[in-house]
Image: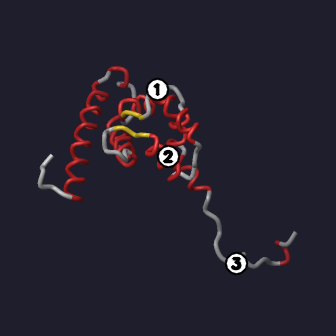
Amino acid sequence: MDSSAQGGKAFGLLKSKQEEKLNSINEVFLSDPKYVEEEDLGSKLEAFKKKYMEFDLNDKGDIDMMGLKRMLEKLGLAKTHLELKKMMSEVAGNAAKDSISYTDFLNMMLGKRNAILKLILMFEGMGKEKEQKDVGPPTRKTFSELP
C-alpha cells in the first residue's frame, strides 16, 4: 500500500484491493462447471460481492463475528453470541473457524443447502415490504362501512 496515503485515500486503496481479490474469486465461480446451470450468475456474484464487502468490517477479506452481528442487526435480527457461532460454523463448515471467507459465503449462497444465514439474506427484502403501515389518523367511515 502507498505509505503516503492516509484516511479516506488509504481506505479507498484497501477497498479496491479487496474488490480485486473478490473479483478473482468470482472468476473462479464463473468458470466452475458446477454452476454452469445457474441463471444470471454474473449479476448474482456482483450482488453477493457488494453485500460481502459491506460487512467485512476488519477489511481482511473475511466476515468475522462482529461483521455477522452487524449484518443481522441491520436486518433487525439481533442474535446471541451462541447463535452467531452456530451460524458461523454452519456456513464455514468448521466449528473452529471464527470468520466466513468469501468462498464460504458464495458456496452458501449458490449451494443447495439452506443455511440459516442464506435464508435470512434471501428474505430480507420481503420482510421490509410487509412492515409499511398507514400513518396518520384513520380514514372516515360511512354508516354502511361500520360493523
Name the one closer to the observer, 111 or 40. Answer: 111
The quarter holding residue 60 reads: top left
Q: Which residue is mark 1?
A: 96
Tell me if label 1 and label 2 are in contact, CB under 8 Å: no
- Badge 2 crowding class, 10 Å Cα cut-off, few under 14, some 14 to 19, many 20 or more, is many
Question: Looking at the image, is mark 3 or mark 1 earlier in the sequence?
Answer: 1
Q: Disc 1 marks which amino acid?
A: Ala
Residue 41 lies in what quarter of the image?
top left
Residue identified by numbered label 2: 69
Pick whichever of labels 3 and 2 is earlier in the sequence: 2
Q: Amino acid at mark 3?
A: Pro
Q: CA distance from mark 3 to mark 1?
A: 54 Å
Instruction: Return the disc, 1 or 2, that comes first in the chain's sequence.
Output: 2
Secondary structure under tag 1 reads loop
Residue 5 shows which numbered tag? none
Q: Report x, y in % for residue 66.
A: 45, 45
For label 2, the SS is: helix
- Side of 24 relative to 146 (left or right): left
Q: Residue at x 56, y 53 (%)?
A: 76
Cα gap from disc 3 to disc 2, whole angstroms: 37 Å
**Mark 3 crowdedness (10 Å alpha carbons): few <14, some 14-19, many ≥20:** few
How far across and how far down the image is residue 123, in percent? 54, 44
Disc 1 packing (10 Å; few <14; some 14–19; many ≥20)? few
Q: Find disc 3 in the rendering and name its residue.
A: 137
| Relative image position of residue 118 (x, y in whole percent) | 50, 36
Task: Give the label, 3 or 2, closer to the camera.
Answer: 2
Q: Residue at point 88% right, 69% down?
A: 147
